[in-house]
Image (spheres, helix red, strand yellow):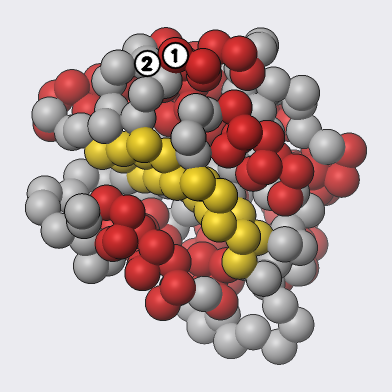
Amino acid sequence: MAHGLGATEGEARIPASGLPGTRVVLTFAGHGQAADPAPGYWDYGVLAEDVLAAADATGASQAVGVSLGSGALVRAAATRPERFARLALLLPAALDAGRSVPAAWALERLAEAVDAAGTDGGAALRERVADEFPAGAELGEHLERRVAALRRLGPALRSLAERSVLDDAAALRAVRADALVVTGTDDPLHPLAAGRATAAALPGARLEVLPSMAPMFTHRRELRALLTGFLGR
């Protein structure tokens, strides 16, 4: 399991819930108990190396990625097309054309809110994070935990806003893993177009679209059914 940018430790484990077999959750640098990364870390090629090292160390044949983790898995698959038997890619944010203008702007606004947290106590960042969820959603402790996680990640937000996962999506033509791509309908950070492009680039990939701006929060039951059906075969 490769988590998204700013994922809390509990959030990173959500896709693993209910899956059979041995489950390994990779923690990227700058998250959870992991140390902050060295300069230059926020590059999909470097993240893909982390994914492949974890997969090789544990003998994983299947992988799930969310957002940032999805991009890292796509880059890993392009690097070693034979490495995985199945890939579940949740909420892809970009492929080879860079991020959409709304997605890049959303990351920039998050980065600005992180910079301001030292003076406003994180008020702007709380507002930005709350905007990622449907109005009236009961976020409980998740809001504060995610704000705390993002406060470590200003450099990542700015660096990744300018990066594509791949130079050319044609690099995925050699991938023979079964692939499931899941995206939502109204999330500016993870536009539907990016999910469609990712599914189209992977031979035989299946695309599932959930009607939500935050499907991992609002559609956990449906997501669990998709993952168990796909990875539990």
Horizontal and vertical percent for residue 191? 74, 49
Q: Mark 2 points at which residue?
A: 81
**Marks 1 and 2: which is nearer the front?**
1
Q: Residues within 10 Å of mark 1 (few under 14, many from 20)?
A: some
Q: Is residue 110 above or below residue 158?
A: below
Residue identifier under label 1: 174
Residue at image point 26% right, 38% down: 62
| Vertical position of residue 171 compared to residue 19: above or below | above
N-term-proximal mark, 1 vs 2? 2
**What whole-number distance in Å separates the C-alpha atoms at marks 1 and 2?**
6 Å
Circle 1 — which element?
helix
From the viewer's perspective, tell me whether residue 43 is left or right of residue 100. Answer: left
> What residue is at 54 percent from the left and 12 percent from the top?
171
Residue 213 appears anywhere in the view? yes
The residue sitting at 87% across, 45% down in the picture is 102
Q: Which residue type does callout 2 highlight? A: Pro
69 over 167 or under it: above or below:
below
Label placed on residue 104:
none
Q: Where is residue 149 in the image (x, y as percent from the top left)?
A: 51, 52
Q: Seen in the image, is 165 located left or right of residue 15?
A: right
Looking at the picture, tell me which residue is in the foreground, 106 or 204.
204
Q: In this view, does 120 lie to the left or right of 159?
A: right
